[in-house]
Every structure is written in C-alpha cells, then in structure tokens.
Image: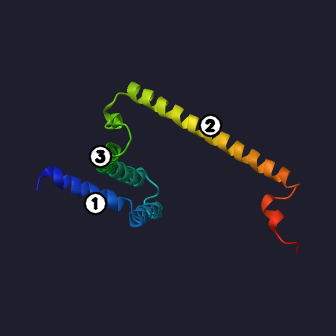
Amino acid sequence: MSTRKLFRRFAEATSRQAGKPLAFILAVALVVAWAATGPLFHYGNTWQLVINTTTTIITFLMVFLIQSSQNRDTGALQIKLDELIRTSKAHNALLNLEELDDDDLDRIRKHYWELAKNARDSIDTIERDAQDLHNDDEGDAGGQNVGDSHQAPV
C-alpha cells in the first residue's frame, strides 16, 4: 500500500477518534492527572514544562492530520456540489468556483447577494400584501373574522 494511502487512512482514523467523547474525556483526565501531581512536584518549572510540551506536540501533529482529512472531505463535497450543478438548471459557470481568484469570487458573490436581497424584498411585499388582505377581511366582516361569521351562536 502506498505511503499516501497509509497516511490518508491514519489521518482519517485519527480525526474520527479525536472527535469522539472518549478523546475529550481522556484529554480532561490527562489535565486532571497533571494538575493533581502539582503538589508532588512543588508546581515547578519541569512540572509546567511537561504539560506545555505535551500539548504543543499533540496540537502540532493534530493540525496536519485534521487538515488532511478536512481537505479530502472538502474535495469530495465540492465534487458532489459540482455534479448537482451540472445536472440541474443552475449555471454551469458555477462549476469549480474554488479555482477563481478573489476578485472574481467577490463579483459573483455580489451578484448573488443582490439576487437574495431582491428575493427578500419580494417576501416583504408579499407579507405586507397578505397582512393588508387580512385587515381588509376583518373590516368587511364587521369586526368579526370571516371564518367566525359561519359559526352557530353558542
């Protein structure tokens, strides 16, 4: 098996395990055990150096493992999104947007922001019209709701 495949499998397994509750519990237990040994070592520099060095090394290594898994997941998700775009009525120009430079992305983002703003404005207009219609119905029924006028007296 290639080194790349071995690393991918190791990175994925490590990322998966690091995200589980047991990993958090073990990390908390490690910190509690370290803190409990403080009086034994008189809270000395070596005692502090142990936790600092341990956490730094773990963090340093985990950054690479998690980044590898995240890059792979992001790549797979991007392919899935591209396929959905390709097979839908969406613009095929949206395929591989991640390859564009920041200026192009900002221009496209502004375009979609304007579309969303116009859609929100349409929703506000619809809600106002619906409220006006509701108010007109109440006025036509002489202060009663339209649905109430068909009910038998109690």
Of callouts 3 and 2, the N-terminal one: 3
Of callouts 3 and 1, the N-terminal one: 1
Of callouts 2 and 1, the N-terminal one: 1
Q: What amino acid is found at the position of numbered circle 2 in the picture? A: Asp
Foreground disc of the pair 2, 1: 2
- Report which residue position mark 2 lands on: 121
Q: Quadrant of residue 23?
A: bottom left
Q: Is residue 142 left or right of residue 147?
A: right
Q: Nearer the viewer, residue 91 or 68?
A: 91
Foreground disc of the pair 3, 2: 2
- Secondary structure at numbered mark 1: helix
Q: Quadrant of the C terminus?
A: bottom right
- Report which residue position mark 1 lands on: 13
- Secondary structure at numbered mark 3: helix
Residue at the extreme bottom: 154
Q: Quadrant of residue 150?
A: bottom right
* Residue 63 higher or lower than 115, as above or below: below
* Residue 130 higher or lower than 14, as above or below: above
**Residue 54 screen position, x and y as percent:** 35, 53
Q: Is residue 103 left or right of residue 3?
A: right
Q: Nearer the viewer, residue 4 or 90?
A: 90
Q: Is residue 48 left or right of residue 57?
A: right
- Secondary structure at numbered mark 2: helix
Foreground disc of the pair 3, 1: 3
Question: Mark 3: few, some, or many residues within 10 Å (few <14, many ≥20)?
Answer: some
Q: Is residue 117 left or right of residue 18?
A: right
- Report which residue position mark 3 lands on: 79
